[in-house]
Amino acid sequence: MKKTLLLVLLSITSTLGFAQYNFYKFSATAGVGGTSFYGDMATKPSYAGNVNLDFNITPFSTLGVEVVKGQFDSNPDVHLRQFTNSFLAYNINGKLTLGQVVDFESSNFLYAIRNLYLGVGVGMIKNKHTSIVRTKTNPDGNPYTFPGESDGSSMYVPVNLGYKFMIQDRFGFNRYQVQLNYQFNTAMKDNLDGYQDPLYLGNKFKDFYSVFTLGLGISFGPEGLY
């Protein structure tokens, strides 16, 4: 009898000390937003849309795949170069939410920011230059062709920073989410703008770009316990 009572007390103590959460093991998110390109040419903001499918390892850590469709648009530079790249990118990534590594129940502030996350991945971006200036006339009257690829591809590394606003269903599970995500991407090749000119024409930097999206998501599938 005494052993039984002790086990019950230990069980109650454990439950009080460590809150448990039920969660769905999968989530899907679709978002829209804008792009910014950072390279050798001045660009203007353009559009993007993305779709994510994530496996929820815990309520606060995920492993997933993402597909992004978007566009980069440039203004003419001093060499008359100008391009529009309608790109398609896809990556695998992992995200870790603050709630995974802090005791958010000990602080109202930590509880409020528990769904702030950071992530990193690896992917491939495929370029499709729907408009690009390939030739110009030099001062001596001879034509010059800008070297580069119009439809190439490159590996890239995405780094994500964002926040999830979670909405519970009638069972108390986090079923729906509104997600703000900023993604900074480093391309492994210097071909997103379609130009690979010599250094004297201003080809100094590798290509980087960012995508900012507002997304809506839903969680589903089997349930996990955390």
Image (cartoon, rainbow, N blue to C red):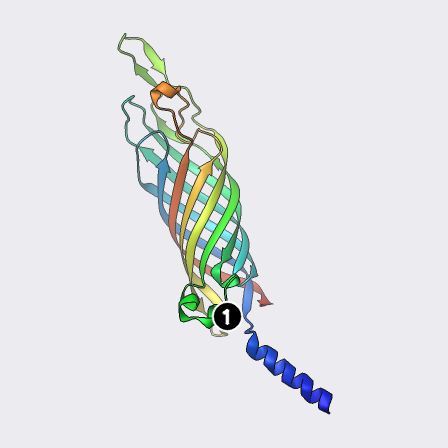
Asked whether 209 or 55 is in front, the reply is 209
Q: In this view, does 220 lie to the left or right of 84?
A: right
Asked whether 116 or 126 is in front, the reply is 116
Point out residue 124 in the picture as x, y percentages from the top left corner: 51, 38
Point out residue 163 in the picture as x, y percentages from the top left corner: 41, 58
Q: Residue at x 28, y 31 (%)?
A: 75
Point out residue 144 in the picture as x, y percentages from the top left corner: 35, 14
From the viewer's perspective, is residue 188 above or below residue 80? below
From the viewer's perspective, is residue 172 above or below residue 96? below
The C terminus is located in which quarter? bottom right
Q: What element carries label 1?
A: loop
- Quarter of the image for residue 73 reads top left
Q: Is residue 211 left or right of residue 65?
A: left
Point out residue 103 in the picture as x, y percentages from the top left corner: 50, 68
- Quarter of the image for residue 167 reads bottom left
Label 1 sits on what residue type? Phe
Q: Which residue is drawn at 33% across and 23% down?
A: 133
Q: Residue at x 60, y 81 (%)?
A: 13
Q: Is residue 32 left or right of residue 221?
A: left
The N terminus is located in which quarter? bottom right
Crowd band around label 1 with a 10 angstrom C-alpha radius: few (<14), some (14–19), many (20+)? some
Q: Which residue carries the number 1 mark?
A: 173
From the viewer's perspective, is residue 218 above or below residue 50? below
Asked whether 52 or 187 is in front, the reply is 187
- Quarter of the image for residue 139 reads top left
Asked whether 40 or 180 is in front, the reply is 40
